[in-house]
Image (cartoon, rainbow, N blue to C red):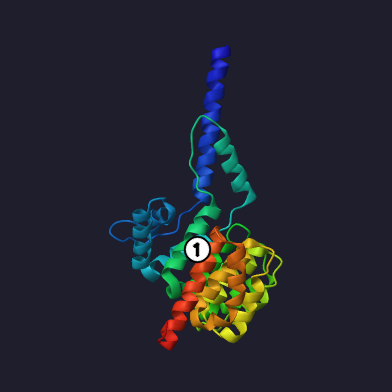
Amino acid sequence: MPGQRLKLWFFGSAIAVAIIASVLLTASRQPVEPLLDGKPPSYYLDRQTYGELRTERSARETIREFGTNALPYLIEILDARESRFKVKLRELAQSQTLIRFRFTPLYILQSQAAMACQELGPLAAPAIPSLTRFVDDPVLAAAVLSSLAMIGPETFPILTNALLNGIPPARIEAAGALRYMEPRSLPLHALLHSLGDPVAAVRANAASSLGFLGCEPEMVVPALITCLDDPDASVRSSAVQGLGWLKVHAVPAIPKPLELQRAEEGTSFGQKITEALEAINAGLIQETGTE
């Protein structure tokens, strides 16, 4: 009798697991995918972060080859919703030991889809509404804001709002991603404002982006000089790097880095200061034709 009950238990458990799997598979209807060289976009999404450089580069190049053909599939992933019932079923299926299932969480698929949109750049413009709904998502905000920045200037209001009013992960990513906006002067004032953000990583990314953009040095250079007194080391480092990128335009800033260089001699920050001063000096030589 005990053996018979055990068999019945295993049989009942197997049926329950099969039912759960059937429900999950039915609820997880996969969107129709286009093919390129016999493989769909889903084959390449996970390979964007494979951990091996050549594989990742090849996957991203192939996603660009798909072009707009991949967009309906990517948008369907971004627009997908997961019910609590489905989540509970998945947790139940994964907690049992009779049959092993491998489920990729929806948020990972959506992160991969956002990365693919980033590779498509302006071609991904139809995905803007789908991407925008994740701007306040602490897990997905960084991926979607990077994608939105690469789509083009029509996403500027979204990124600016994220920078000025978003959650910390969104502000951090927007401060870095806005450097890719065209025209380059477009995000200048929002980035200058963000040098006063309470989160150090936002200030650091904003300082770096301002140097990278190279616009309006008469406003940017004094702002970056002020950042050299920031209490956070990452902000000071980004400000020095930004001044180096500004080259000859940063000549008025030279006294402050020189002062810091003496105090930071032998440190990694001191090396960054040296590199920035060399870049400023090289820009001055190129501008004046004298050494």
Q: Is residue 69 visible?
A: yes
Above-or-below relation of 101 to 30: above
Q: Relative to residue 230, is residue 127 drawn left or right?
A: left
Amino acid type assigned to the residue bearing label 1 in the image: Ala
Seen at 51% across and 78% down, the residue is: 246
Farthest residue, direction left: 37
Q: Position of residue 41 (x, y in %)?
A: 39, 59
Q: Position of residue 270 (x, y in %)?
A: 55, 63
The residue singled out by tag 1 in the image is 114
Instruction: Name the residue nearer the viewer: 181 or 266.
Output: 266
Judging depth in this view, the residue of 289 and 14 nearest the camera is 289
Q: Quick check: 210 above or below 69? A: below
Residue nearest the observer in this picture, 15 or 81: 81
Q: Quadrant of residue 251?
A: bottom right
Question: Horizontal and vertical percent for residue 159?
Answer: 59, 73
Q: Name the outermost residue toward the top.
A: 1
Asked if residue 132 can be seen in this view, the reply is: no
> Residue shown at 70%/72% (left/top)?
196
Task: Please determine whether, in this image, residue 18 is positioned above or below residue 75.
Answer: above
How many other residues sit within 10 Å of disc 1, few (<14), some (14-19) or many (≥20)?
Answer: many
- Circle 1 sits in a helix, a strand or a loop, which is it? helix
Q: Position of residue 157 (x, y in %)?
A: 60, 78
Spot the residue most to the bottom: 288
Q: Nearer the viewer, residue 114 or 3?
A: 114
Which image quarter is the N terminus in? top right
Q: Is residue 128 left or right of residue 50?
A: right
